[in-house]
C-alpha cells in the first residue's frame, strides 16, 4: 500500500476571477518553502513528486524538487476542476454556486452541461490510486481535486466536504483501487485560487 501526501498549492497571486493560471504571490512562495521542509522531514527519503500542470502547483512543488534534487512529473488528472465557462468573472460565480452543493447537483447543473464531472472525479482518483499503488508519492494539487479525493475516501457527498488551507497536506493510503484518509490537512476559511 502506498501513501499519497496530497498538498494544496500555496496562495496564488490571483483568484479564479483574476487570472486563468496565476503563479504564487510572496506568501505562497513562503508557504511552498515551509511545506517542502515539512515534507522532507516527514518522509524519510525522496519519493516521486507529481504536480498539476497549473503554474501555482508547479511553483509550490519547486522548493521540494530542489531539496530532493528531482523534477516534478506533470499529472494533468490532478488539475483543478475544469470550468464550463471562459469568462473569469462568470466562472467564479459558477464555482461558488457548485461549491455549495453536492456532487450530484454539480452533475445536474445546467451551466455544467457538456462536462462530465463524475468522470473528472473518477480520473482524479484513478491518478492517485495509480501513482501510489506500490510506492509513496507527493502530489501537488487543488482545492476541489483534494475534495474529490476526500469524498472518495470518506463517502462525503458535498463538493466541499472540507476546506484545505494553502499548502496543507492531506495523507491518503491506497491499495491501488480505493483511497483511505489517514490524515486530513489543515482547514481554513480560504478562497479558491
Image (spheres, helix red, strand yellow):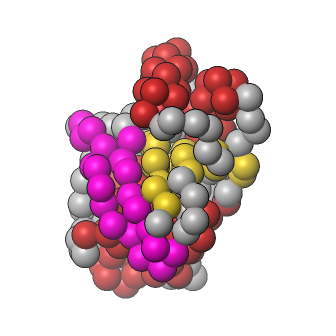
Among all residues in the image, which is located at the extreme front?
44
Q: Nearer the viewer, residue 12 or 130?
A: 130
Left or right for 55, reference 191: right
Task: Determine the residue positioned at 42% across, 33% down.
Answer: 42
| Residue 122 appears left or right of 52 | left
Quarter of the rendering containing residue 23: top right
On the question of residue 89 being in view, the answer is no
Of 41 and 161, which appears nearest the observer? 41
The x and y percentages for residue 35 are 46, 28
Counting labels gives: 0
Read off the magenta span.
169-188
Residue 162, x across and y down, in percent: 25, 53
Q: Is residue 178 left or right of residue 150?
A: right
Instruction: Say if the magenta span includes residue 184.
Output: yes
Residue under the point 24% across and 60% down:
161
| Residue found 72% across the figure and 49% down from its top | 73
Q: Classify 36 as above or below 88.
A: above
Q: Position of residue 94 (x, y in %)?
A: 40, 61
Image location (x, y in percent) of residue 59: 63, 31
Residue 105 belongs to magenta span: no
Residue 129 shows in the view: yes
Name which quarter of the figure residue 82 lies in: bottom right
At x 54% / y 53%, what residue is drawn?
136
Amino acid at each position: 500500500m502506498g501513501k499519497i501526501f496530497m498538498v494544496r498549492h500555496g496562495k496564488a497571486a490571483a483568484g479564479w476571477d483574476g487570472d486563468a493560471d496565476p503563479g504564487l504571490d510572496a506568501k505562497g512562495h513562503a508557504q511552498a518553502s515551509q511545506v517542502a521542509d515539512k515534507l522532507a522531514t516527514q518522509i524519510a527519503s525522496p519519493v516521486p513528486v507529481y504536480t498539476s500542470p497549473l503554474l501555482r502547483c508547479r511553483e509550490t512543488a519547486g522548493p521540494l524538487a530542489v531539496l530532493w534534487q528531482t523534477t516534478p512529473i506533470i499529472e494533468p488528472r490532478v488539475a483543478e476542476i475544469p470550468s464550463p465557462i471562459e469568462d473569469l468573472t462568470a466562472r467564479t460565480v459558477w464555482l461558488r454556486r457548485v461549491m455549495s452543493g453536492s456532487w450530484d447537483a454539480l452533475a445536474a447543473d445546467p451551466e455544467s452541461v457538456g462536462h462530465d464531472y463524475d468522470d473528472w472525479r473518477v480520473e482524479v482518483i484513478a491518478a492517485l490510486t495509480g501513482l501510489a499503488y506500490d510506492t509513496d508519492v507527493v502530489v501537488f494539487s487543488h482545492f476541489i481535486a483534494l475534495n474529490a479525493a476526500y469524498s472518495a475516501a470518506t463517502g462525503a457527498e458535498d463538493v466541499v466536504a472540507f476546506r484545505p488551507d494553502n499548502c496543507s497536506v492531506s495523507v491518503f493510503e491506497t491499495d491501488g483501487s480505493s483511497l483511505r484518509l489517514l490524515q486530513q490537512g489543515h482547514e481554513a476559511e480560504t478562497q479558491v485560487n
